[in-house]
Amino acid sequence: MTELVMFAYPWDILEQGVESFFDEMAALGVNRISVATCYHSADLIVPNRLKNVATSAEANVAHLPLNNDIFSDLSIPKGSLVKNHPSLFPEIHKAARNHGIGLTAWTIAFHNSDLAKNNPDSAIENCFGDKFSHGLCATNPKSQAYAKQMVNAICQTNFFDTVMVESLSFLLYGHGHPHELWAARLDPFTRVLLSLCFCESCLKEGKTKNIDGMQLKARVARELNRTWNSNVSIERGEDDGKELASRLVHDHEFTEWVRMRCNVVNKLASEITTIVHSYGFEFEISAAVWGRPSSMNWAEGVDIKASAQIADRFVLESYYPEISEVARELDHVSSLAQGEKLMFVQTLWPEHNNSIDTLIKKIEMARAMDIKWIGLYNYSMATKPLLSWIKAVSRKLKD
């Protein structure tokens, strides 16, 4: 059986009405809801209603009641949904059960601008000593404790049977939600170099692997300064990763630093899997935040092959308009993980899927690779025409 998963924000479920929402999902043939339990900062347009259309997510707060005593150094405050609608998640849990729909806790690990700004000792620190305002360092012990405690607290609510964690990784520069301005070259090569973390925790971890982190830090800083201030103009743009591939081949310490980051995330993911499994629930790891194409997940410390082996599923968000691009993504990820260990996610955005045939063809490619979990991202931002396609998608999945 193929599982059809709809991603949704809890405030939009509240806006529609819990029973009405689950009635609609059941009628569309959706098997599971992945509901945000916390979220990063974002401005959102909800096109399928006539009020509260242009909204902002309530960021970096818990949207459901959690046991705050479980947190040690870093913690997450209660959001307005907990304060003003404390029964929302119990109602969501009850409605999902009554409709025979599974419930996944969609949560955020290290993409948290409040925690990063207020706890700079736990934030990512680049080669220039700058602290990132939007991302916690995955090596930092306080950050790791926070991620594990967050998952533990969510499991304790007993509202869900699955937990999906997003941003269990080293976030890259950008996407901090301010008005970002830069004139310097910022492409995959320079973005990755600028985003490498050299905080105290990473330097200590590197030392245990016999990597001279301070020397690498200085070299990366010099390289960025050189390329940004070269007399040869290099335009901003998307390269195809060739410069990074060359760096991986020719720079041993850079390669070892990258592998160290992957091992840090793998170890943490394994510990979180153990926590989730101890409750009898399943665990899913989402692709890297900037993990498109999927072959770039390593840049954030996400090892797709290891992630699929550690967790119950690796979540591939293949957000491309062209069928050929999605085929490339599926081929790459299927070379690293079996289909039964993958979830394939498509957006309900017209620019990515401009016809029902396009959406169905992409899903059929995933099914041909034995992928049995199909995600749709997401209910809140979908237009009415795309929402109307879901019933046809559901019927197709039953063929």
Image (cartoon, rainbow, N blue to C red):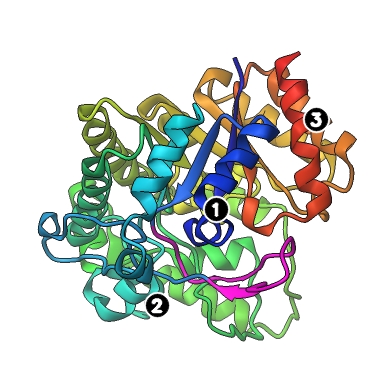
Residue 160 image offset from top left, x and y in percent: 35, 37
Q: Is residue 50 magenta?
A: yes
Query: Please, what secondary structure does the residue beneath circle 2 have?
Result: strand
- Asked whether residue 256 appears in the rendered view, the answer is no
Tell me the kind of residue under disc 3: Ala
Q: Nearer the viewer, residue 78 or 87?
A: 87
Q: Which residue is mark 1?
A: 247
Residue stretch rendered in magenta on the structure:
38-56
Where is 238 relative to 395, above or below?
below
Mark 2 lies on residue: 133
The number of discs equals: 3
Tell me: residue 211, above or below residue 195: above
Q: Which quarter of the rendered picture does the N terminus lie within?
A: top right
Q: Are marks 3 and 1 in contact (CB under 8 Å)?
A: no
* Left or right of 16 in this view: 256: left
**Mark pair 1, 2: CA separation:** 27 Å
Q: Is residue 234 visible?
A: yes
Q: In this figure, which residue is indicated by the disc labeled 3?
A: 392
The crowd level at tag 2 (other Cα within 10 Å; few <14, some 14-19, many 20+) is many
